[in-house]
């Protein structure tokens, strides 16, 4: 497990949850700040209305004309009791005729009632300006961003601290598995070599064949574990592989394992099919399928391995006559085993799944309980070397 990715992933989840919780008070804070901003704008318009009224009060009736005040920050006008303009700099029509302050989308209006007949027969002074809440939005976004960053950093810090004992246990477990694999490799190699030497010098016997088959099963499990431990740190380079010959070799390798259950491996392999793939990864795919077909087949039955080209695609299938699969969607999960009596660790098909995803190999599964299963792998055209 990648501990850093695990910590970051959970920190993001935690940060999202906390941020959502914080959105409620932040929303009310946003409403409050908008109201404050609106009140400030209302005070501003009231001050400006007083300036206009003051200028009208100072107007000398003996003067020939009154120069109405003009401002860049707001518009204003004088209206009669029916809200018809006597003189107005306000553009557009009014949508509200009520004394006081109100907002109309981004427009703010202040309607002030004037003493009757005192200011050019006007009954109302209306002041209008545009209200922008951009400052409020910026402040809220800045607060939200700061809170999220703070929580995220705090989450990562504490999750790393909390996970430290588990990291150490994982490291010890990984080291134990690596050391175990290394220790298993040497005696396993010695067993295989000595069995081969014995078979060359002595007549074949069923006990030695069973030992050889068991050693091969153990080798397959060892290779799965070795791949599982190393695949994140090893770069698997692709090579040109004669898939036809490769399959024949692996079938021959597992023939002794099949004989333990009196199972016959029947092959229908088209010659000279070449693909571009890493040999170790191809071996994991082929070995796990043949091994599983043997493991889950009934005794004294047959397994069929076929390879052919159809419409530019390569089809590789493994068909057994066995117990079938009850939960097809579950079999690729690591450590999942439908039949615990059959042994194994439940990692083989998980490895196969990761490999075929990497190569974009399509998999079709047909299974019927107590009758058998067929795994068909469809290699994409880009992998074929014709």
Image (spheres, rainbow, N blue to C red):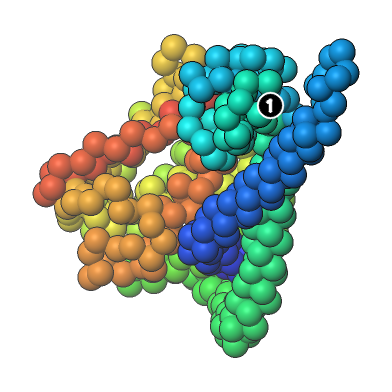
Q: Looking at the image, which residue is at 60% across and 77% down?
A: 159
Q: Return the x and y of residue 72 as percentages of the image width and height.
A: 83, 27
Q: Is residue 2 left or right of residue 284?
A: right
Q: Quadrant of residue 306?
A: top left
Q: Return the x and y of residue 202 as percentages of the image width and height.
A: 45, 68
Q: Looking at the image, which residue is at 69% across and 48% down?
A: 43
Asked if 172 appears above or below 305 in the picture, the reply is below
Q: Return the x and y of residue 109 as percentages of the image width and height.
A: 60, 33
Q: Residue furthest front?
A: 62
Q: Is residue 142 left or right of residue 322?
A: right
Could you say which is closer to the camera, residue 63 or residue 289?
A: 63
Q: Is residue 244 left or right of residue 44?
A: left
Could you say which is closer to the camera, residue 297 or residue 195?
A: 297
Q: Looking at the image, which residue is at 52% across and 63% down?
A: 25
- Picture quarter with the C terminus: top right
Q: Looking at the image, which residue is at 49% across and 19% down?
A: 82
Could you say which is closer to the camera, residue 211 or residue 344?
A: 344
The answer to whether residue 280 of the structure is visible from this angle is no
Q: Residue furthest left?
A: 370
Q: Quadrant of residue 57?
A: top right
The answer to whether residue 80 of the structure is visible from this angle is yes
Q: Return the x and y of residue 252 as percentages of the image width and height.
A: 43, 47
Q: Which residue is mark 1?
A: 119
- Picture quarter with the N terminus: bottom right
């Amino acid at each position: 497990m990648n501990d850093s990715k695990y910590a970051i992933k959970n920190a993001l989840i935690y940060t999202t949850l906390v941020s959502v919780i914080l959105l409620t008070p932040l929303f009310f804070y946003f409403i409050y700040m908008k109201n404050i901003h609106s009140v400030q704008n209302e005070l501003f318009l009231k001050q400006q209305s007083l300036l206009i009224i003051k200028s009208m009060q100072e107007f000398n009736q003996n003067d020939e004309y009154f120069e109405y005040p003009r401002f860049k920050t707001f518009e204003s006008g004088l209206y009669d009791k029916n809200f018809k303009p006597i003189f107005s700099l306000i553009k557009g029509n009014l949508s509200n005729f009520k004394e006081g302050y109100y907002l109309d989308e981004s427009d703010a209006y202040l309607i002030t009632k004037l003493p009757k007949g005192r200011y050019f027969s006007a009954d109302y002074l209306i002041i209008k300006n545009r209200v922008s809440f951009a400052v409020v939005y910026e402040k809220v976004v800045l607060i939200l961003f700061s809170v999220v960053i703070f929580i995220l950093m705090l989450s990562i810090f504490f999750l790393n601290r909390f996970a430290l004992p588990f990291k150490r246990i994982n490291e010890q477990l990984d080291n134990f598995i690596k050391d175990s694999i290394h220790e298993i490799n040497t005696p396993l190699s010695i067993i295989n070599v000595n069995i081969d030497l014995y078979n060359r010098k002595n007549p074949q016997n069923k006990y030695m064949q069973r030992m050889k088959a068991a050693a091969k099963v153990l080798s397959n499990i060892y290779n799965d574990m070795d791949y599982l431990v190393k695949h994140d740190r090893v770069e698997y380079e692709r090579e040109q592989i004669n898939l036809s010959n490769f399959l024949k070799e692996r079938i021959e390798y597992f023939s002794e394992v099949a004989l333990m259950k009196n199972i016959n491996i029947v092959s229908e392999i088209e010659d000279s099919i070449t693909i571009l793939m890493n040999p170790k990864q191809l071996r994991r795919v082929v070995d796990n399928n043949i091994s599983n077909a043997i493991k889950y087949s009934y005794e004294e039955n047959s397994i069929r391995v076929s390879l052919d080209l159809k419409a530019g695609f390569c089809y590789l299938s493994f068909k057994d006559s066995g117990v079938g699969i009850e939960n097809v969607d579950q079999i690729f999960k690591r450590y999942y085993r439908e039949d615990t009596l059959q042994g194994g660790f439940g990692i083989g098909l998980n490895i196969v799944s990761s490999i075929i995803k990497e190569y974009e190999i399509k998999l079709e599964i047909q299974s019927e309980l107590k009758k058998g299963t067929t795994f068909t792998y469809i290699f994409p055209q880009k992998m074929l070397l014709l």
